[in-house]
Image (cartoon, coloured by chain):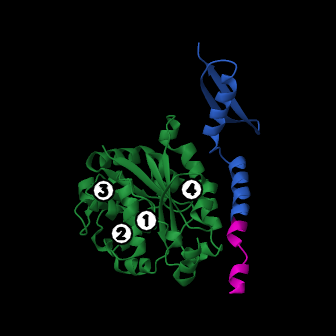
Chain colours: A green, B blue
Amino acid sequence: MGIVIAVISGKGGVGKTTTTANLGVGIAQNGKKCVVVDFDIGQRNLDMHLGLENRVVYDMVHVMDDGVSLKQALIKSKITPNLSFLAASQTKDKSVLDSEKIKKMIEELKEDFDFVILDAPAGIESGYEHTIEFADRAIVVVNPEVSSIRDSDRAIGILDSKSQKVKEGKEVEKYLVINRIDPKMVQSGEMLSSEDILDILNIPLIGKIPEDKGIIEASNQGKPIILTKDSAAAQAYERVAKRMCGEEIPFVDVEKENGGFMSKIKGIFK
Amino acid sequence: MFSFFNKKRSAKTAKDRLTIAIMSDRESTNFPFMDELKAEIIEVVKKYIDVKGVTIQKETHDGVEALSIDVELNK
């Protein structure tokens, strides 16, 4: 029986889908059976990140409403056979989502996969609520920036009041991924540090991802950056994926990396 | 060089502003602090009598919002 992980953020554009794609690949490469599901109805994007946009025949709504089997709708990634993908519906509007049907679909996915990762839509409307409804855990993606952090706290609040697990008196474990860290700006005090963000949000950290120009290039090609082994972001995502698989991986201080000459000088005097 | 050390630390400002904004968001909307509140109530009541559990619910009656707190005692 697999676990269901919702990737949430509140604010859009912080790297939720990028994170979902990279963690999906990373977890699958760690030998776990993993399925990533795009819950962003009407704004399908995860397929592009994974380079699978041309292979989508059936989507989630076909499975829930039109009697298409999961087997028909799931797309196996060419990157690793352990990774499958289920597309969001691009045509119907998100009011089509129905709790009972989602539950049935997720239960079925849990039988076949170790990890069921749901890419939530931005915002905190019904589409978001449906994504978190049956989640066991949540990965909260933020940028070190005020609106992202504030919105994520609202998203966490809704998760803590509306998910099925919470209604049953249990807890949905939440883990923070801080994305797009600019080490130089953090060092000069112009960007919130991970300690600052942890103080404010008060949930455990699972990853710090440095800003990396390679991310755009990776999405251009439909090949998640985690496949580019020498990139700092790739290595950071790899560490998160391993932590999610239960490995104890020490945190790397990405905020102190790439500091260049000044940080080296400072380092000597520390 | 001088300007580098003299740079305004806007991260500090961001942290202070966020702390206040989020606190007020949490108060006015939902109750992510519910678990802590529960734990603290249990701690307080436990000083006097054995507690089994606490349930807190937000209720609205005739436009008036209220927290209903039920403390279940151990026998």
Q: Which mark is residue A34?
A: 3
Q: Helix, strand or loop at disc 4?
A: loop
Distance CA(mark 4)–CA(mark 2) = 22 Å
- Residue A47 numbered mark, or none: 2
Sequence order check, earlier mark of 3 and 1: 1
Q: Are marks 2 and 1 on the same chain?
A: yes
Task: Name the kind of residue labelled 3 in the image.
Answer: Cys
Give the magenta part as a residue range: B1-14
> Amino acid type of disc 1?
Thr
Q: Which mark is residue A19?
A: 1
Q: Earlier in the sequence, mark 1 or mark 4?
A: 1
**Magenta span main SS:** helix
Question: Callout 4, which amino acid?
Answer: Glu
| Disc on the earlier residue, 4 or 2 | 2
At 46% from the left and 81% from the top, the residue drawn is A213
* Residues tagged by mark 4 and mark 2 found on one chain of the structure: yes
Task: From the image, state whether disc 4 or disc 3 is nearer to you.
Answer: 3
Residue plotted at (41% across, 43% down): A100
Q: On the rendered structure, is A152 left or right of A104?
A: right
Q: Which residue does the numbered mark 4 point to in the structure image?
A: A125
| Location of residue A80 by image quarter | bottom left
Asked if residue A97 is positioned above or below residue A162 in the image, the reply reads below
Instruction: State the residue at coordinates (46%, 65%).
Output: A252
Q: Residue A89 at what x, y percent from top left?
A: 39, 63
Which amino acid, by three-letter code, is at mark 2?
A: Asp
